[in-house]
Amino acid sequence: MTAAEVLKPPASPAGVAGPGPAGLRLVWLHLRSRRAPAGIGALAVCGALLHLALHWHWAFNSGAYAQQVPMIIEAGAATVIAVTAYSPFGETERSAGRWLPCLRLLTVAGMCGLAIALLQLGAVGESLNAGVLVLARNVIGITGIGLLCSLVTGALLAWTLPMGYMLFCQYALLQAWTAPWVWPVRPPADRGAWIWACAVFAAGLLLFAIRGPRTRLSDDS
């Protein structure tokens, strides 16, 4: 046996496919570590619940009160996105992964787009008060709140602030508040509400992509 034969790598067995592109594998591992497949399933459930709520008239058909039940479901979808930011690897991943900011940003943006699409699909054929614009504004804005919350509480508790905000907006809806920072109760064309929702989402997404969720208070317990 020659030295060349020793150094030669073993041939792959016939019919066994080689590994895929490293970038795609990295994205897939990132999504799996965040339980994104389960999150997508939960978003699909939210879409189905919205369809049932509209079809069986669980809320008013028109007027401000018609936003109550859809707002709860939209906030639920947003909290799903925030909770999927949880990583079981904690500080180890944070210190070793230079692609983490991009992966975090793309994951959240993709989940938000998918959430809006699934909720809108659930509303097809039904009367969704205020339409898809308010639906999209609620999802991105409340997701931003959840991402900001994850920086303080960790991803596993990132649902607390969005749910608290949703309950507060339910009160604001009953009191007919018009402040733009309670954007879920504002009409679709309200510019101030859009500015607030987009600003909160942008701030949450940027800080989350750079820093990631807190890993000591709750995640590493």
Image (spheres, rainbow, N blue to C red):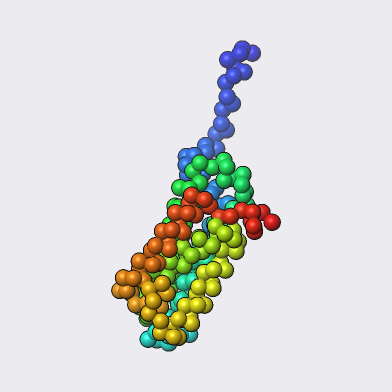
Q: Name the residue at 55% across, 47% down.
A: 29
**Is 90 drawn above or below residue 201 in the view shown?**
above
Q: How many discs appear?
A: 0
Residue 153 is left or right of residue 177, and the answer is right
x and y, in percent, of residue 159 in the image: 56, 67
Q: Name the residue at 44% across, 54% down.
A: 206
Q: Nearer the viewer, residue 211 or 85?
A: 211
Q: Quadrant of the C terminus?
A: bottom right
Residue 182 is left or right of residue 14, and the answer is left
Q: Name the residue at 35% across, 66% down.
A: 195
**Is 15 drawn above or below residue 200 in the view shown?**
above
x and y, in percent, of residue 215 in the image: 61, 53
Viewer can see residue 40: no
Q: Quadrant of the N terminus?
A: top right
Q: Nearer the viewer, residue 45 or 167?
A: 167
**Is 54 drawn above or below residue 83 in the view shown?**
below
Q: Farthest residue to the top: give it.
A: 2
x and y, in percent, of residue 80 in the image: 53, 65
Q: Name the residue at 50% across, 61% down.
A: 148
x and y, in percent, of residue 21 in the image: 47, 39
Residue 144 is left or right of residue 94, and the answer is left
Viewer can see residue 6: yes
Q: Farthest residue to the front: give it.
A: 179
Q: Farthest residue to the right: give it.
A: 221
Q: Give residue 181's quadrant in the image.
A: bottom left
